[in-house]
Amino acid sequence: MTSRLPDASAGLGLRRVLLDALQALPAEALPPFDFLECAPENWIGVGGKFGAAFDALAARHPIACHGLSLSLGGTAPLDETFLARVRRFLERYQVPLYSEHLSYCTDDGHLYDLLPLPFTEEAVRHVAARIRRVQDALGRRIAIENISYYAAPWQAMDEASFVRAVLEEADCDLLLDVNNVYVNAINHGYDARQYLAAMPSARVVSYHVAGHYDEAEDLKIDTHGAPVKDDVWALLAEAYRLHGVRPTLLERDFNLPPLPVLLEEVGRIRAIQRAAVPAREAARV
């Protein structure tokens, strides 16, 4: 059985452009991060220089996985062949945490975007059944991530209620993306802290933080291409207060700065985690 990541752990998204810098870190020193996260789609079947570099890093650091293409909310049949390949990948690298997006990304082909589901009871039943099938195929629980979205197809319930209903119906876990909560709260006019408070603590197994672009006061774009904003750091601290410290990943996909700059943000995650633990202990007294 694959071991869990420690709750007080901070990770970095694994991108190919970072491979050389990550491999150059001294093996004898304590690593400046606790785990790396990758999309299995980007590494399944990769050989040569990149495959060897991935294997070397996986031998030194725990690997978490965050999928991009299951299309959990889609209407096309799940790709059982792909699921079998994912399972072999997760087992080969003893991946402790696998997550996917609460969205769809296919319609007679891959759409290369994460599109929102209607917030309806029918959608709850549909996506939950597919999540259960994925969990059966992989032989493990998975976590679903709340996505950022800019247009809602239909909302018979609010977003938080929809996410809770899916978690309950599917009996799966939650990867709580704090930046997505912040972006959606601004764009759709709800209270981010109320959203966090509505999430079921027992199902929160991980967090993501990332940067976004301020298009306007009332429009934020989830880019993963900038430093994390102070308001998002504050929201992460609030999530820790409400739900406890869990493994937390810094996502950065574009405009990547040098590795030391990224590691400063990973260090900030660790600092917020350290501050959160005594605060929760004091609250119990």
Image (cartoon, rainbow, N blue to C red):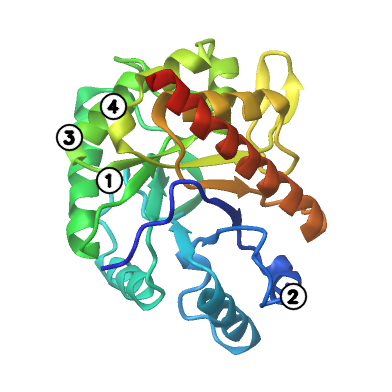
Gap between marks 3 and 4 measured at Cα: 9 Å
Q: Amino acid at mark 2?
A: Asp
Is there any visible trace of residue 148 in the rendered image? no
The residue that mark 4 highlights is 164
Expressed as whole percent of the image width and height from the top left, the position of residue 60 reads 55, 75
Expressed as whole percent of the image width and height from the top left, the position of residue 22 reads 70, 70
Q: Are marks 3 and 4 in contact (CB under 8 Å)?
A: no
Lower position in the chain sequence, tag 3 or tag 4: 4
Expressed as whole percent of the image width and height from the top left, the position of residue 151 reads 50, 24
Gap between marks 2 and 3 measured at Cα: 43 Å
The relative height of residue 68 versus residue 18 in the rendered view (above or below) is: above
Name the side, left or right, on which 249 lies relative to 213: left
Lower position in the chain sequence, tag 1 or tag 3: 1
Q: Amino acid at mark 4?
A: Arg
Q: Nearer the viewer, mark 1 or mark 4?
A: 4
Question: Can you tell which mark lies on residue 138?
Answer: none
